[in-house]
Image (cartoon, rainbow, N blue to C red):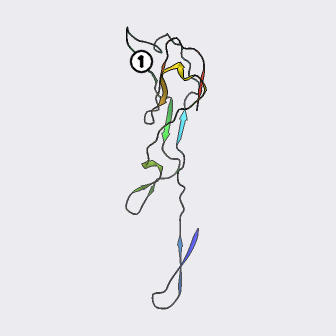
Amino acid sequence: MLVNITENPSGLITPLNATLRVYPVNTRPVFTLTNSTVSAVEGTPPFYTKGPGESAIPFTTAGFVVNISKMSGEVIVGPSGEIWGEDAQNLMFIVELVDGEETLFSTFPSIDATTGALTYGLAEEGSGFATFR
């Protein structure tokens, strides 16, 4: 975008040209999901292990999400050195159940935004399917 700026320091009109750059805001983060299907069999290690009187231990799949970047564009530095853009923002994954039963899980699935690890725990004696987004 080209903006025409006019100044009048001595009564004369002198056109000056300046370039105005418009940056996108809220560009979405980028990441790679390494597997879209996770299968687990309740009652088989490591998916359901507990001692007498203990709760089920959540299972973690390391590297479920990789190549995590908070933004998909360039890093923009403001006039005072501040970062303009998503790189300065906190990133989080929201795991939403869209089909299936939440009761299948003793620990609801979550994804760590820093490591990309998927963590979940299976409920005792549960069976079925669950779909998330």
On the rendered image, what quadrant is the C terminus found in?
A: top right
The spot of residue 69 in percent (x, y) is: 48, 42
Which residue: 45% across, 36% down?
A: 113
The spot of residue 101 in percent (x, y) is: 58, 22
On the rendered image, what quadrant is the N terminus found in?
A: bottom right
The residue lying toward the viewer, choosing from 121 and 89, is 121
Q: Quadrant of residue 36?
A: top right
The spot of residue 84 in percent (x, y) is: 45, 55
The residue lying toward the viewer, choosing from 118 and 56, is 56
Q: Can you say whether 98 is above or below 45 in the image?
A: below
Q: Label 1: which residue?
A: 57
Which residue: 40% across, 63% down?
A: 79
> Hey, what amino acid is under mark 1?
Ile
The spot of residue 57 in percent (x, y) is: 42, 18
Q: Can you say whether 95 is above or below 102 in the image?
A: below
Which residue: 52% across, 11% down?
A: 125
